[in-house]
């Protein structure tokens, strides 16, 4: 399914989310900070980044996470933490976790299906006869 990075300081919450997403067939990595998530994303860009609002509120831009083509950012946490304009526009959804854990799983499946439908799925391989110069 999808490659997902969970970013936040609450290790217990992230572990519970990781278990739910892994059970749904997703590949999940966790990070404690945006810098760590960006470092992890260099090796394998995630399709979905689930990030604590407290961390996003200090970010200048959500695109520094290095998402895969067709990827999205989901915010969770205290809704009182205001998000900067560019970050707010980049966020696909805002969830109250762990209460909306099922919604997160469904959203991850939707983003993965959308990426596959639009041809932005990283696992898709172009047949040799369709490659230019072959």
Image (cartoon, helix red, strand yellow):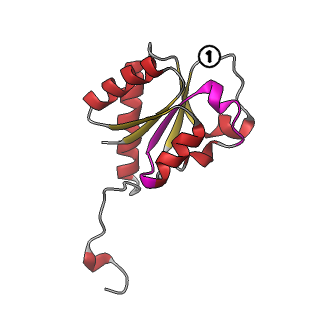
User: Of 36 and 57, which appears nearest the observer?
Assistant: 36
In the rendered image, the quadrant that contains the C terminus is bottom left
Bin the neighbour count of mark 1 within 10 Å (Cα to Cα): few under 14, some 14-19, many 20 and up: some
**Left or right placement of residue 33 versus residue 131 in this view:** right
Where residue 57 sits in the image (x, y, percent)? 69, 30
Q: Residue at x 61, y 47 (%)?
A: 63
Where residue 85 sits in the image (x, y, percent)? 74, 36
Q: Among all residues in the image, which is located at the extreme bottom?
A: 133
Residue 61 quadrant: top right
Residue bearing the label numbered 1:
78
Above or below, 51 relative to 2? above
Q: Residue at x 40, y 45 (%)?
A: 114
Q: Give the magenta-colored segment's residue range.
A: 43-60
Q: Is residue 67 in view from this perspective?
A: no
Q: Residue at x 66, y 34 (%)?
A: 88
User: Of 72 and 36, which appears nearest the observer?
Assistant: 36
Q: Is residue 22 in view from this perspective?
A: yes
Q: Among all residues in the image, which is located at the extreme top?
A: 99
Residue 60 quadrant: top right
In the rendered image, the quadrant that contains the N terminus is top left
Asked if the stretch drawn in magenta spans residue 95, the answer is no
Above or below, 17 relative to 56? above
Q: Secondary structure at mark 1?
A: loop
**Left or right placement of residue 22 versus residue 50 in this view:** left
Where residue 83 sits in the image (x, y, percent)? 70, 29
Asked if the stretch drawn in magenta spans residue 55, the answer is yes
User: Of 38 and 96, which appears nearest the observer?
Assistant: 38
């Amino acid at each position: 399914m999808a490659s997902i990075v969970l970013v936040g300081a609450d290790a217990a919450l992230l572990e519970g989310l990781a278990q739910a997403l892994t059970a749904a067939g997703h590949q999940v990595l966790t990070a404690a900070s945006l810098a760590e998530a960006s470092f992890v994303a260099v090796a394998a860009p995630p399709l979905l980044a689930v990030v604590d609002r407290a961390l996003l509120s200090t970010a200048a831009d959500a695109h520094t996470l290095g998402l895969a083509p067709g990827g999205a950012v989901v915010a969770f946490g205290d809704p009182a933490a205001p998000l900067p304009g560019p970050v707010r526009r980049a966020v696909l959804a805002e969830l109250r976790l762990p209460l909306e854990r099922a919604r997160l799983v469904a959203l991850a499946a939707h983003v993965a299906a959308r990426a596959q439908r639009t041809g932005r799925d990283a696992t898709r391989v172009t047949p040799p006869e369709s490659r230019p110069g072959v």
